[in-house]
Amino acid sequence: GENVEQHPSTLSVQEGDSAVIKCTYSDSASNYFPWYKQELGKRPQLIIDIRSNVGEKKDQRIAVTLNKTAKHFSLHITETQPEDSAVYFCAASGSYQLTFGKGTKLSVIP
Amino acid sequence: ETGVTQTPRHLVMGMTNKKSLKCEQHLGHNAMYWYKQSAKKPLELMFVYSLEERVENNSVPSRFSPECPNSSHLFLHLHTLQPEDSALYLCASSGSGTSGWKGAYNEQFFGPGTRLTVL
């Protein structure tokens, strides 16, 4: 089955700096890669996703890049703000399911 | 109410109890999921249902029994649980999109979760 590795497990940045979270996956057939944000005590919510026919996607301060050859994808958050503090999960699609990484706890220090 | 709802939000049960978790989605989706979230395995898929049929079961112990009577409702029946089953149980749903029913290729919407404590 699919295996998704996510790094780092924790990340602290100063407000205004950029944050990068990286994931690798094992199944070359995977073609959908979403990122979810989970604030403390709340449900995971999709923040951005990318499909395998696209190399990069941006939405305001958030961007995702995908390298299918190397089987890795990354989340980039620019100009971080305190409200970006949360746990971020990457995922890759398998046959019938999403396989999630173990999460990255991002702390933005004011 | 819109979105994905779950009841109860909190549940404390003994190891000999029988209880059920309920999930309801109001999004017109045709796939529903149960996840277990704990410190050791942050988002662990338990069951996948599409069009009310179970299509995936990641070797979950038989003390967890899912039921999907229709495309809007999903239950997780619990019996003789162990303390290590204490976790947040999340329900999710997704639509078929352009990839057929395969909700894995489309956004999954999560419910608020049920915080389960097994004594």
Image (cartoon, rainbow, N blue to C red):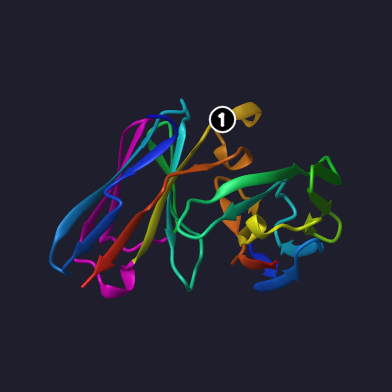
Figure disc tally: 1
Query: In screen coordinates, is B84 left or right of A61?
Result: left
**Residue drawn where x is 64% and y is 31% of the image:** B99
Confirm whether the magenta stretch covers residue A109.
Answer: no
Residue marked by disc 1: B96
Residue sitting nearer the eye, A53 or A60? A60
State the image quarter where residue B51 is shown: top left
**Residue drawn where x is 61% and y is 51% of the image:** A36
The segment highlighted magenta reads B59-86
Confirm whether the magenta stretch covers residue B80.
Answer: yes
Q: Is residue A33 above or below residue A4?
A: above
> Chain ID for label 1?
B
Q: At label 1, which amino acid type do we have?
A: Ser
Q: Is residue B97 above or below residue B32?
A: above
Image coords of residue A99 (percent x, y): 59, 56
**Residue drawn where x is 41% and y is 52% of the image:** B90
